[in-house]
Structure formats: C-alpha cells, structure tokens
Amino acid sequence: MLSSDVPQLVWKAFALVLLGMIFLNTLFVWFALVYLLFLVLALAIEQPKSVHIQRVGGEIKAYVNDVIKLEEHVTVGEGRGIVTVADKLPEHFELESDEEDYHKNFRVFWKGEGTLSEDMSYNVKLTRRGNYDIGPPIYESLHTANLRQVEVGFGSDPLKLVVRHRPINVRKLRDPNVLSQIPMPLGAMTLFGVRTNEFIELREYKHGDPYSRINWKATARLSCRRPNSTPLVNDYESEGKKTVWFFLDSSMNMRIGTEIDNAFEYAIKAISGLSQFYLSKNCRVALNVYNCGKTILPDTGRRQEYKIARELERVEINELHGTLRQAIEDNKWHLVGQNPLFIVVTMVRKENLRELLQGIKSMRLYSTVGRAQIIIIHVMGYDIAARGSFEEAGARMLDLSNLALLRSLRRAGAFVVPWNTKTQIILKPMLARARIR
Amino acid sequence: MKSLSTSRYISLLELMAAITLFSLSFYIFARSFASTVVLNVLTSISPFQWSIDTLFISLIVLIILGFAYDIESGGWPLAATISWTLLLSSLLGYSNTDFLGFFGIPLNLAMFKPDVPVPFVLGTGILLAAGDLFFFNMDSLKWIRSRLSLRGAPRRDIDLVIWRNFVFLSGIAIASAVLTFSGGISSLLLADIFSDLASKFHLIFIILPVAASAIISITLLLYLRKTGEPGQKEGFLGASDGR
C-alpha cells in the first residue's frame, strides 16, 4: 500500500501539467516529468521482502543478575530499503551497553543490492526472577523513499526465559566460629516414619518396641544396679519426618523498594536458599504464601525443590487479605503431630505486628515437643528503599523504632532474625542467631 | 551536542543549496521584462528606490530568515515558493497561447520571455524540481532518523542507513532530472521537425499534452487499483518501542 507522501508528489506534477496545458507551455510538462519519473523509478523499487530472523537458542535458564547473550541472524532476500529488527524485552531487564553503543535489542540495517545477512547480538542483565515468554523478533521494512507503507512482520522463534534466584551455597558459608549450624527442626521425635541409623538416645522399653532394638549391654549394666528395671532400647531418628514450613508474606507491605529491588524479592531469595538447604538435609519442606493462600504441602526430594522453585518464580505481591493465622488454620491437618520448624519471612511493621503475634500463638499449638521452633526473618525493607546518606540515616532510625516490635515477637516465643539485605547474606544472621541460642 | 552541531551543519548545506537554486531563478528573472515591472511597482509603492541588487539582497535575507525561523525542518518551502514565483514569470514568456487575452487582459505574455537560452531556463526549472525532491527526501530521512533515535537504535546503524538511503535517493532524483533534461534538450533539437508537423497539424499542441496526461492518468489509476489506496505511514514506530 502507498504512503501519504505519494499524493504530495502527484499533486505537484499534476499542477505543473495543468499549467502546461493552460498556457500551452511544454516547459511546465518537462518539470512535471521530474516528479513523475522520480515516482515511477522509486516505486519500481520494492521495499525489503523475504525477511527471515532466526534466533539462536530456544530456552534459557539463568539466575537473577546473570548477564546472558541473545543472538539472532537476520537475512533479507529481496528489495531495497531500511529494515529494523527489534526484540521486545520485559521492561525491567537491563540492556548491557558497550562502548560503541552497538549491541542492542533494536537494530537498523540497510538492504542494498544482493542478500543482506547480518548477525545481531546483545547482552541482557536479568534483574528479576520469573518465567518470561519473549515473543519472536519484530521487523519493519521501510520503502527507500517512504512512498509505501511500512510492512511489519515477525521472526519465527520465540524465546522462553526462566529466571530464578541464585541458590545459596550453604557449605561455603559455614563459619567455624559459630557454635551451631542453622536451626534444624525437632521433628525427629515423631513416632511415624521409618527409623534411620541416626542414634538419638537410650530409653526404657515400651510395649510395641521391636526386640532387636533392645540394647542388651546397657540393660545388663542397669540390671546390676536395679534388678527389676525394664530393658533399655536404642532410639533412632525417623527418616524424612523433620518438617519445615515456610510462610511467605506477599502483602503490599513487602512492596517497599523498587520493582526490581524490593523486600519481597529478598524474601523469595531467602526462602529459595533455605528451602534448598533443608531439602538437602532430607527435611520435608512446605511453603505457604499466606496472603493468597497458595500452599505446597510438605514433601522431600528434587521434585519438591522444583515445585517450590516454580512457585517462587510465579508468585507476586497481591492485595488479598489472608493472614498468617488463617494460613496455619487452613493447614492444621498437615501440621498436627509434625512438630515442625516454622520460618516466616516478612517485614515486621506496626501494621502487621498483631497478625504476626496471632500467627505465633497458632504455631505454638503445633509444637508438641520442647519449645516452639518459630523463626521470623525480618527483611529490613527501609534499608532497601534508602538512597543516599540522608535516606540511609532515616532508614536506620526507622529500624531502631522497629526494635520494640521485634522484642514483642521474641517475647511471644519466636526467634527474630533481622536481615539487612544490603550488608548481609541470609545465612549469616541465621548462623549468628543459632549461636546465641 | 554533537548531533545538534551536525543538524546545523546539514541546515547550512540546505541553505546554501536553496540560495544557489534561488540565484539561478533570480538570474533568469533579472534578465526578463518582469523584473523591470516589479521594480517599478516596488518603487512606486515604497519610499525607496529599488534596484535589482536591493531586490536580490532582500530576497536572500528573506530566505535566510526563513531558514533561521525553522532551522530543524529547514526553510525550503519559502525558498521554493520565491524561486518558482520568479521563474514562473519568465516561463510564461514561452507560452503559446494568449491566456490573459481570453479574460480581456491586454498583456502579451511573450514580452516576459527572458534574455537567456531556453536550455538554461529548462535546466533551472528541472534543478528546482530536483531540489524540491532533494528536500522532500531530506524531510523524510530526518523523520526516519528522529524516530529511530527515539527508539534507541545504535547511532552507527542510523548514520550508515541514513547515508546509504540518502545516496540511493539522490541517485534516483538525479537520474530523474538528467533523463528529463535529456528529453527536454532532445525535444528542442527536434523542435524543427515538430514545427513542420505543427504547420501541417494545428492541433498537435493540444493533442500531445492531452495524450500524455491521459496516459499518465491511466497508468496511475491502474497502478493505484493494483496496490490499493494511498494511506498513512502506519505501523512504523507508532507502536511503543522495542525495549
């Protein structure tokens, strides 16, 4: 289809021809011929056609803040003119610029004589986790004199991009100075499950214990002192019955910071790392996003790791009003008898303190052995949002004002781990907390 | 800063091209009776004594002011209007009909014929038309350049593409001008043959232009029917950016 520029030239030529006819003056007609010849010659040249864009690679899995290289090969077979090729990327991705400012997701090529064959590549920093479907490249073909309308088309290969938070390598972070490792759940005290070879203690024989568990040496030694005593048996840990429940706060409360760098993203990062750690220790791990009520029930192994990772890729901040207490109530049948380790990842503020206290109260109901194991990871969001020294000082003031809130949570029976995301990686504060215990 | 200075450099070149084309048409105007008429009229309505030099300088200043007023898009429309107007009076001298006499105006157009050879007038007119095409293409390329820059295309890409397109379009415009000029000169050389024909067929001056116009119109109509109606420059960058 012709563009709106064509009539301009046609009218000029027509006006000159008309003048030539009125005054019987051939000079006007010759001048008109310049425009008409230009039109004919320019329109005889087709705009670029047979555009093929082939993307290198179909699916990419990467971690947040990784820089990946995207490559495309552009071929244009016919015509002459300008061809633009663009990849539409999610707006929060960062394009890595080079010195020449040359490698970009939007390129322009000149299709002259012969086949155009060009490679296009650029680097992108993946700033946010998620599953992204990047559509096929878009191309535009422009007529050389802009006398035809622009043709828009698409390349053939869409790109699937899976971006996850980089897992925390626990081994590297083990600190020989700390007295204890990351808190482990006490779920081994449960009566269910297959017994492992991990010895816990000697205890008195109970009805139903298999005879093979009786420790005859210990029983003999005891019988010397107390002849009527019951036999002693070896007690072992149950396999896979240590349970860890993660509760993720996805309320608007977690939105503090930018779209890329906010408290919620750090919370996800923390859960991603810790869930992998606990799964690697054969714990059953469960996840609940307690504002929207999504739950992944306790399970072990790589399948569970994949399920949690997928959920963490998709989860977003929402405006729903589910509470921690409600989440625990909803999952009570999965919590009974488990004596799990509860890990709540949130940002403690005056607004959600009451909700957290109620949640702690509910959690304690399901801690049947010893003291309740409740860890609240407090993502220090004010520090994330702070830019510049004045704002950082302000953030510190707000953190100080939060100390009273954290104390009240500790009094309620939770271990509160304040996490300054700018200066600490998640395991450090947890290790430090473990030593205090 | 660099792009601003580049655009000013281009505007300066455009101004020089416009002044050159204007000078050519003014030269023809100055060599015609129309200049005497215009100078007499100007002197009678203004307190100053107008000469051909003062008129030339005044118009040059006007064109420069036109460019300075709208430096980004160029002041070509003003320069083109002035140049065509000046040339028009001389072109009328070559008319083969007493068009004004038809309306009862006792003015013989032949007296406006300039004192320069016909090929010079033909060449100047063709140059003006080619200049118009040049500025038309420049406008189009400036628009494409600005849109590509806004969308964040690499600067090197834009420079290369715009330059190659400019060269290609200039080639087409020059080819059109050269072909037309060759045709015009050939027709002048063949004028004698045609004058013989004209002496035999009096209607040839009507038949030929009418036939030419009819052929052009039919060709355009057929072409438009084949490719569709003219429309807007849709699609190109109307949508949001690739990033």
Image (tube, coloured by chain):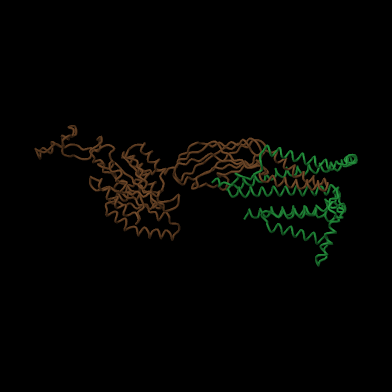
Q: Nearer the viewer, residue A328 or A114?
A: A328
The answer to whether residue B164 of the structure is visible from this angle is no
Picture quarter containing residue A385? bottom left
Q: Nearer the viewer, residue A184 or B26?
A: B26
Image spot of residue A408 (x, y percent): 29, 56
Name, please, the residue furthest toward the bottom: B47
A410 lies left or right of B4: left
**Mark count:** 0
Foreground residue among A15 and A266: A15
Of residues A359 and A74, the one drawn nearer to the viewer in this rendering: A359
Q: Position of residue A234 (x, y in %)?
A: 19, 37
Residue B204 lies, in percent from the top left, at: 85, 41
Q: Is residue B11 left or right of residue A432?
A: right
Q: Residue furthest left?
A: A227
Instruction: Specify whether A181 is left or right of B61.
Output: left
Q: Which chain is green?
A: B
Q: Residue at x 35, y 56 (%)?
A: A351
Q: Report the quarter where the N terminus of chain A lies.
A: top right
**Above or below for A115 versus A11:** above
Q: Residue furthest top?
A: A212
Tell me where residue A420 appears, x and y as whole percent: 38, 53
Observer able to see residue A203: yes
Chain A in the picture: what colour? Answer: brown
